[in-house]
């Protein structure tokens, strides 16, 4: 559990550095945004897929012992 928490902290820190450097995390091509009058809808499809791939790879690496 300790290794997982350390890795999770490193991933969050890396995401913060990338955002600070200007990576448009959350506004990738493939993220859908609709605005009409007072209604707005945002669906982060590409961001969700990217996060899923990264988390899958990390958990696969952690699972190997």
Image (spheres, helix red, strand yellow):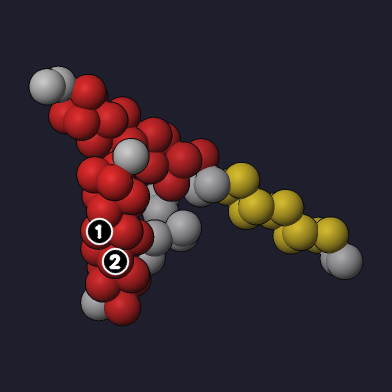
Residue positioned 29% across, 46% down in the render: 2
What crowding class fits label 1: few (fewer than 14 Cα within 10 Å), some (14-19), or many (20 or more)?
few
**Vertical order, 25 against 2 (above or below):** below
Residue 62: percent from left, percent from top: 20, 31
| Kind of element beneath mark 1 | helix
Residue positioned 46% across, 40% down in the render: 48
Residue positioned 40% across, 54% down in the render: 28
Q: Quadrant of residue 63?
A: top left
Nearer the observer, 65 or 61: 65
**Vertical order, 28 against 45 (above or below):** below
**Vertical order, 13 against 61 (above or below):** below
Separation of marks 1 and 2 at Cα, in angstroms:
5 Å
| Kind of element beneath mark 2 | helix
- Residue placed under numbered mark 1 in the picture: 10
Q: Quadrant of the C terminus?
A: top left
- Residue placed under numbered mark 2 in the picture: 13
* Residue 23 seen by the camera: no
Pointer 1 with pointer 2, Cβ within 8 A? yes
Relative to 56, is 43 on the left or the right? right
Residue 64: percent from left, percent from top: 14, 21
Relative to 2, is 40 on the left or the right? right
Residue farthest right in this picture = 38
Relative to 54, is 49 on the left or the right? right
Residue farthest top in this picture = 64
Residue 44: percent from left, percent from top: 54, 47
**Vertical order, 58 against 37 (above or below):** above
Q: Quadrant of residue 14?
A: bottom left
Residue positioned 39% across, 34% down in the render: 52
Residue 27: percent from left, percent from top: 46, 59
Residue farthest left in this picture = 65
What crowding class fits label 2: few (fewer than 14 Cα within 10 Å), some (14-19), or many (20 or more)?
few
């Amino acid at each position: 559990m300790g290794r997982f928490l350390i890795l999770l902290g490193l991933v969050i820190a890396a995401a913060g550095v990338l955002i600070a450097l200007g990576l448009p995390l959350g506004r990738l091509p493939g993220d859908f945004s609709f605005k009409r009058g007072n209604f707005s809808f945002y669906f982060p499809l590409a961001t969700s897929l990217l996060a899923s791939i990264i988390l899958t790879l990390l958990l696969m690496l952690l699972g190997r012992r």
